[in-house]
Image (cartoon, coloured by chain):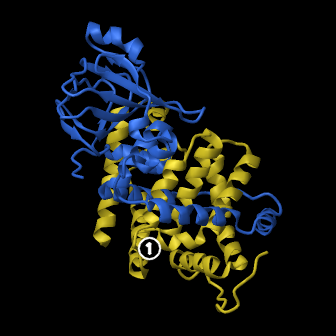
């Protein structure tokens, strides 16, 4: 049965103040206190977006809802692991949703993704300073993503949102595979530069 | 381990997006274990995924969605976390994951379930043998271990699709350079090469393909149906 640790003071998080930072706080509350209200705040923010991401793969709303629930269940169960993840909360939840999509829709193994995740988590890495940097990086990536030239933005979205392979993108857009790759490289170069500027 | 050849940046971005087919994703995972540079690229690319999740449209949830999730949590308070912890503890005690390969890469171990010396090699041609690795039923790619004898030169061949090769043991040389343990050859359609093993031991590679390999020479074309690559 779920028992809350009463020795740790309960804080409510106002996610309207600084969303990225406060998502960290919400996860911390879930990890330390098994705080269901904090989990609900995170759920309200992310669940409809995760379901939308799932529905890019299939119009079946029931399957999308199930995979969203599985994603959020993993967020609850692995909240304590997040402190060592070197990225933003949204990137971490994206990776969980990505693995559920591969499992659920493509029905392919994802054990190798988990192996690398476990490896990263075994590192003596990440502290609050690292988290601040990761928040800043996330903000920069978000800004740059919005300002990419349309043809590069399209490739990145088809890849990360529609989960199309490079070959599928090439066929869908009727452009050579090499063009898909070069646009992807150009987009990544800009994003990478923005990330490096933060460091 | 001194790594000189990495996956193409677009391969790493596709890995982060989750769009690589299983065989390719397994090989990238094997390389990531020992390559901090590529791990950093994947982490950066995952930030793009996070950004798109944040910017995503919202789809209404079914009625009582959060309540049902809470029920799952209450019924199975921490099944996943307990499993993870027990697996994690076991991992820490017996084989703490490291940024180096003990014998085989972590990501390959769960597929192979055997040591490299216990692999049952199937001979394809003099000096060339392979060991196909079973993937999920829905995989659209093939994964195999290839063992090429010391001094052996493969027939010149091109590729009908993307091919990713990770060197696990030994080394080979082709027009792109020398590929040794940990290196990845990330070859696209229509790239032709003629690798020759230059190490004192057999060269063992993990290879992912999405389409049959096309050999240029007559010997290669004869070999292809036998090789099955």
Q: Picture coordinates of residue B172 (x, y %)?
A: 21, 33
Q: Chain of mark 1?
A: A
Chain with colour yellow in the figure? A
Q: Residue at x 37, y 22 (%)?
A: B160
Asked whether B226 or A17 is in front, the reply is: B226
Q: Residue at x 76, y 48 (%)?
A: A62
- Left or right of B177 on screen, residue A124: right
Residue pushed farthest front? Answer: B118
> Does A95 sit above or below residue B82?
above
Can residue B21 be seen here? no
Q: Colour of chain B?
A: blue
Could you say whether the residue bearing mark 1 is in a helix, strand or loop? helix
Q: Picture coordinates of residue A101 (x, y %)?
A: 60, 47
Can residue B76 be seen here? yes
- Left or right of A74 on screen, residue A177: left
**Residue matched to label 1:** A135
Asked whether A78 or B190 is in front, the reply is: A78
């Amino acid at each position: 049965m779920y028992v809350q640790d009463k020795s740790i003071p309960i804080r409510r998080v106002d996610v309207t103040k600084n969303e990225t930072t406060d998502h960290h706080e919400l996860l911390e509350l879930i990890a330390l206190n098994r705080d269901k209200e904090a989990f609900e705040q995170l759920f309200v923010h992310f669940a409809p977006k995760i379901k939308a991401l799932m529905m890019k793969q299939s119009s079946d709303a029931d399957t999308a809802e199930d995979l969203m629930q599985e994603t959020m269940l993993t967020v609850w169960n692995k909240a304590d692991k997040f402190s060592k993840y070197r990225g933003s909360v949204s990137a971490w939840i994206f990776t969980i949703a990505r693995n559920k999509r591969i499992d659920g829709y493509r029905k392919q193994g994802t054990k190798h993704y988990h192996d690398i995740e476990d490896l990263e988590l075994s590192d003596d890495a990440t502290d609050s300073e690292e988290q601040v940097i990761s928040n800043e990086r996330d903000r920069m990536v978000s800004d740059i993503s919005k300002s990419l030239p349309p043809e590069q933005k399209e490739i990145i979205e088809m890849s990360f949102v529609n989960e199309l392979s490079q070959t599928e993108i090439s066929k869908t857009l009727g452009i050579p595979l090499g063009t898909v790759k070069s646009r992807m490289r150009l987009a990544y170069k800009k994003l990478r530069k923005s990330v490096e500027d933060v460091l | 381990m001194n790594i000189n050849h990495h996956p193409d940046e677009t391969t790493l971005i596709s890995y982060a997006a989750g769009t690589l087919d299983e065989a390719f994703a397994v090989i990238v995972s094997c390389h990531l274990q020992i390559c901090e540079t590529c791990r950093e690229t994947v982490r950066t690319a995952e930030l793009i995924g996070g950004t798109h999740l944040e910017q995503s449209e919202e789809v209404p949830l079914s009625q009582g969605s959060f309540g049902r999730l809470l029920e799952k949590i209450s019924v199975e308070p921490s099944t996943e976390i307990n499993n993870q912890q027990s697996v994690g503890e076991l991992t820490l005690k017996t084989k703490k994951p490291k940024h180096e390969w003990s014998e085989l890469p972590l990501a390959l171990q769960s597929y192979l379930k055997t040591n490299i010396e216990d692999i049952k090699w199937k001979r394809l041609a003099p000096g060339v043998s392979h060991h196909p690795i079973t993937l999920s039923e829905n995989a659209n790619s093939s994964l195999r271990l290839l063992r090429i004898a010391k001094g052996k030169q493969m027939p010149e061949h091109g590729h009908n699709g993307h091919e990713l090769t990770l060197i696990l043991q030994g080394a080979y040389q082709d027009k792109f350079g020398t590929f040794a343990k940990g290196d990845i050859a990330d070859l696209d359609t229509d790239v032709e090469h003629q690798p020759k093993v230059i190490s004192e031991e057999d060269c063992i590679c993990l290879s992912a393909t999405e389409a049959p390999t096309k050999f240029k020479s007559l010997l290669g074309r004869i070999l292809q149906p036998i090789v099955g690559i």
